[in-house]
Amino acid sequence: MTIRRILATAVAAAVTTPVLLLSAGPAFADARPAAPVQGKQTQGKPSVEELELAAAAAQKAYDEAVAAENAALDALKALLSDTHPLAVAVTDARTAAAEAATAKTAADQAVVDARAALDALPETATEEERTAAAAKLTEAEGKAAEAATAKTAADTAVTTAQTALDDARVGAARAIGEARNVTKQALADKNAADAALAKAKEEAEEDDEDGEDCVAEPRLTTVVTGLPSTVVAGTKVDFKLRVTNGTEKTMDEVLPFAYVHATDTSGRGSLEDLVRLQWSSGASGTWKTVDNKNYMDGVSPLKAGAHADIKLRMTIDAKTPAGNGVTFVAGDYFNEDGSCGGSPDLAEYGFTIAAAGSKPGKVDDAKPEPTASGSSDVTPQTGGGARTANGTLAATGASSATPQLALAGGAAVVLGAGAVFVARRRRAGSHI
């Protein structure tokens, strides 16, 4: 029942139930399942059968997206053909315009000829001859005017037909781009669902082999202090993670966990690349990145009733738009005798991201989501004295205890939900 076991299926659960884990702030969903410790989290984990259904649904969605993309390609190919109705309309309009141009040229020449005939009359010409020549000129000028009007209309028809064809082709090309994005997202969803299913099957096999699992330990608590409820883009904030062993036994090694997820105000656009989380080893002042390749070192040991404080720093890129974020924290422990366990849930602290240059004034610290009913008796223990991360963090590094963090792709992110996947690498002497 370690964090690895509980959260490894969060990605797949987010595929089947998008509003699952990340819900801090107005951009996230309000309805979330209750959890027994420090925040609202998922209740239980999906079965292999449920994950198989999720994987099948993701496969179907991907197949449909591929079919839609192919249909969009076929639509563009048809529009590029000379036999398409819009292309035929352009050809017909151009033919009519050419005929109108020829007719106008002939009409204009008739005016020139009529005027020349009138001018060529000799002085001996009779009044009747002059009247007849003038009448022919007037008639020719009228026909020339009609031909000019007809040519203008024909040219306009060409422009209209060509615009309709061009707009249709541009729209079809845009539809292809959109369809490809949908296909790409559907593939990400499918891969996430497949990975979650594979992981669940792997863990089921491991459970069969091990015969037992780590246990939930609600008295191993993680609390964040000093994280503002509003953070301005282009700034960095320092805060603290306190890991407390509220049990009556020493934990040989405690692995703290922290993760930040953020989206824009719509809840659909991920801001993951613009938000960076770091931790400090203490007196050295060196800041190390917390991500899927680098993780905070373990606290070795953490005595009964004691707590360790770890410095955290979150940097928000100046290009980050206004949005909402949430910081997740938890912890696992491992003992030399092979026993292990961890926080049953992730504690979550929601915060608002203000655009660069904003002046939010004095803001309160971010607060954890309310604890579900039935867990109010669980409180952090502070006995044994505070210990900073400096000097108490085992130099295990990513080589011995590396978590794998990933967001549920596609549908979950699009709908404003997020999920965290933690998979701790097997360590020598531990039964994870």
Image (spheres, grey):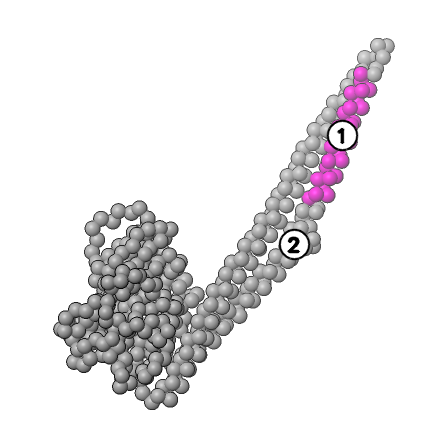
Name the amino acid, label 1: Ala
Viewer-closest of 371 and 259: 259
Q: Residue at x 76, y 35 (%)?
A: 102
| Image-based side of 269 in relation to 70, left or right | left
Q: Which mark is residue 75?
A: none
Residue type marked 2: Leu
Q: Is residue 408 visible?
A: yes
* Local secondary structure at mark 1: helix
**In the rendering, at what x and y percent does residue 183 appear?**
51, 65
Residue beneath label 2, please?
80
Q: Position of residue 341 (x, y in %)?
A: 27, 80
Residue 106, horizontal then vertical, whole percent: 78, 31
Q: x, y (%) of residue 342?
A: 27, 77
The answer to whether 195 appears left or right of 73 in the picture is: left
Predominant SS along the magenta part: helix
- Pick whichever, 416 or 2, lies toward us: 2
Which image quarter holds the C terminus?
A: bottom left
Q: Quote the CA–CA distance across marks 2 and 1.
A: 37 Å
Q: Are marks 2 and 1 in contact (CB under 8 Å)?
A: no
Q: Earlier in the sequence, mark 2 or mark 1?
A: 2
Residue at 69% in and 53% down = 82
Q: Secondary structure at mark 2?
A: helix
Magenta-drawn segment: 93-119
307 or 105: nearer the viewer: 307
Q: Is residue 221 left or right of residue 411?
A: left
The 10 Å Cα crowd at callout 2, few under 14, some 14 to 19, many 20 or more, is some
Q: Is residue 84 above or below residue 328?
A: above
Where does label 1 land, which residue?
Answer: 107
Question: For residue 392, what is the image quadrant?
Answer: bottom left
Tell me what residue is drawn at x 30 percent, y 52 percent: 235
Q: Is residue 47 magenta?
A: no
